[in-house]
Amino acid sequence: MGDPHPTPPHAPSPPKPHATDPQDLPAPSRTDPHTPSRPDPHTSTPPVPHTPTPPKLHATGLTRTFGRGTKQVEALGPVDLAIAPGEFTCIVGPSGCGKSTLLRIAAGLLRPSAGTLEIRTSSPRPAAMIFQDYGIYDWKTVLANVRFGLDIQRVPRKEADARARDWLLRMGLADFADAYPAALSGGMRQRVAIARALAVEPEILLMDEPFAALDAQLRTILQDELLELTQSTRTTTLFITHSLEEAIVLGDRVLVMSARPGRVIAERRPPFERPRSGAVRDTPEFTALKSELWELLRGEVRTETVPA
């Protein structure tokens, strides 16, 4: 007779539980942070090649001379310069080194003697300039001064008034729209000049020592106001100044120019992320960078003041 309890053929035996020794486990993979991981060809797509953004302003071998013959003065260059879109670039250098000449070439007010300066833009009037002496019109009201660039561009009056009043509000001048410049303080006049420049929504803002004529306290206030404005608009800015403090507070980049004929001899980037505030003035990094810039500039200032 057969077995009353036959065993099924080829019946699998259940797995036996057992303790796992940690040493028996595969070691976790470690990736060297400095070694790029290899993409899986079955799941990854080829990387898109990075195309650098073209500079907004690009100068190559730029020079400028004034006069002729024995009276010819080499004022600038050669200068090679590239400013990225949205970058705030400050230029410092001794008096007479060609800083303002460079700015006027960028504004189209002067022609270079040699070299090129290119601005990548889709606008026929890409730049707005702010001068040290305000450059506002005494016979126009504050509102008309701020609206002036828009009138030149033939912006409809209703739209132009609205944009001008908006910038007056931003600059704290809304209550002075119908006043004339003679009734304003120096700081208020410079605010009018800044509002007029920004109202046309320029692609490039050119500023030639705009706060040089102001007292120290007012200068600090306007620096902080300009810092806040340009961080919100991200307008590409070329800013000329004699103040190292001003350059460090405002700039993404600080360029140091030599004595005449001016050339770029050094570049430094303030180690402060954006958005930033005027509080960076109180940091050790600010003091260290100011000292470094002064050491770079000191010899050039002496060269300019010692007769040849």
Image: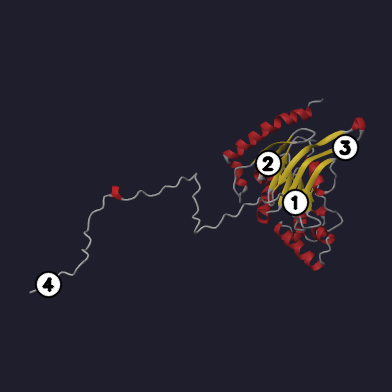
> In front of the other: label 4 or label 1?
4
User: Looking at the picture, how far across and down is residue 54, in whole percent?
Assistant: 70, 50
Disc with the residue nearer the chain's start (4 vs 1): 4
Q: Secondary structure at mark 3?
A: strand
Given the image, on which type of amino acid does mark 4 rest?
A: His
- What residue is at 73 percent from the left and 50 percent from the top? 56
Tell which circle, 3 or 4, labels the residue nearer the N-terminal end.
4
Q: Position of residue 77 (x, y in %)?
A: 79, 37
Q: Which mark is residue 66?
A: 3
Real-space Cα separation, disc 2 to disc 4, in angstroms: 94 Å
Q: Is residue 185 above or below residue 166?
A: above
- Distance of mark 1 from mark 2, alpha carbons? 16 Å
Q: CA distance from mark 3 to mark 4?
A: 117 Å
Query: Which residue corresponds to mark 2?
Result: 254
Asked whether the residues under the numbered discs 3 and 4 touch, taking CB atoms below 8 Å apart as contact, a structural biologist would say no
Q: Is residue 200 left or right of residue 281?
A: right
Residue type, numbered disc 3: Phe
The label nearer to you, 1 versus 3, is 3
Residue displayed at 13% across by 71% down: 6
Badge 4 crowding class, 10 Å Cα cut-off, few under 14, some 14 to 19, many 20 or more, is few
Residue 137 location (% of width, % of height):
85, 54
Pointer 3: residues within 10 angstroms few (<14), some, or many (20+)? few
User: Mark 1 and mark 3: span between their CA atoms?
Assistant: 26 Å
Residue at the disc numbered 1: 205
Picture quarter with the C terminus: top right
Whole-number angstrom distance, CA of label 3 to CA of label 2: 27 Å
Instruction: Please give the residue where the numbered disc 4 appears in the rendered image.
Output: 5
Residue type at numbered disc 2:
Val
Query: Given the image, on which type of amino acid does mark 1 rest?
Result: Leu
